[in-house]
Image (tube, rainbow, N blue to C red):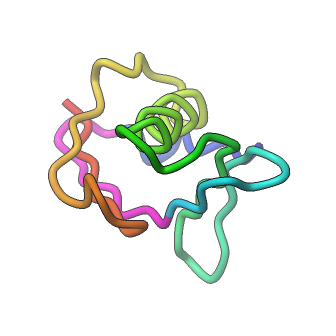
Amino acid sequence: MTDLAHLALSGATLAVRVTPNARRAGVYVVDGVIRISVTETPENGRATDAARVALARALGVAKTRLTLLRGAASRDKLFRLD
């Protein structure tokens, strides 16, 4: 899992790409893009919730500090760190 603590600035917006139904969960940075793989299915927001938890863990912050701004039903999501 990638350590993204240097990005944990209050008010920062983080664009991520989520891959649901992955074989292995993790947070990776590929070509400057934050990619989150989750094992959850994309039904009823489960993959989005799992992505929020994984991103919060990589940033070293509480998951309640991350607010989803855009992309509830999309692989491309935008989170704001409060």
Quarter holding the C terminus is: top left
Q: Is residue 16 above or below residue 32?
A: above
* Residue farthest to the bottom, as pictured: 31
Residue 32, given in percent of the width and then of the height, sits at 55, 76
Determine the residue positioned at 29% across, 32% down: 66
Q: In the image, 9: left or right of 29?
A: left
Q: Is residue 27 above or below residue 66?
A: below
Residue 81, picture quadrant? top left
Up the image or down, 46 lies above or below 15; here it is above
Asked whether, in this view, residue 17 is left or right of residue 64, the answer is: right
Who's the residue at 60% across and 55% down the image? Answer: 20
Residue 31 lies, in percent from the top left, at: 62, 83
Residue 24 in magenta stretch? no
User: Residue 27's x, y, as percent?
Assistant: 66, 50
Where is residue 63, by image quadrant?
A: top left
Seen from the viewer's position, the closer of residues 21 and 17 is: 21
Give the quadrant of the N terminus: top right
Q: Report the magenta residues as a range.
A: 9-17
Given residues 63 and 10, the one toward you in this image is: 63
What residue do we see at 83% from left, 48% from top? 24
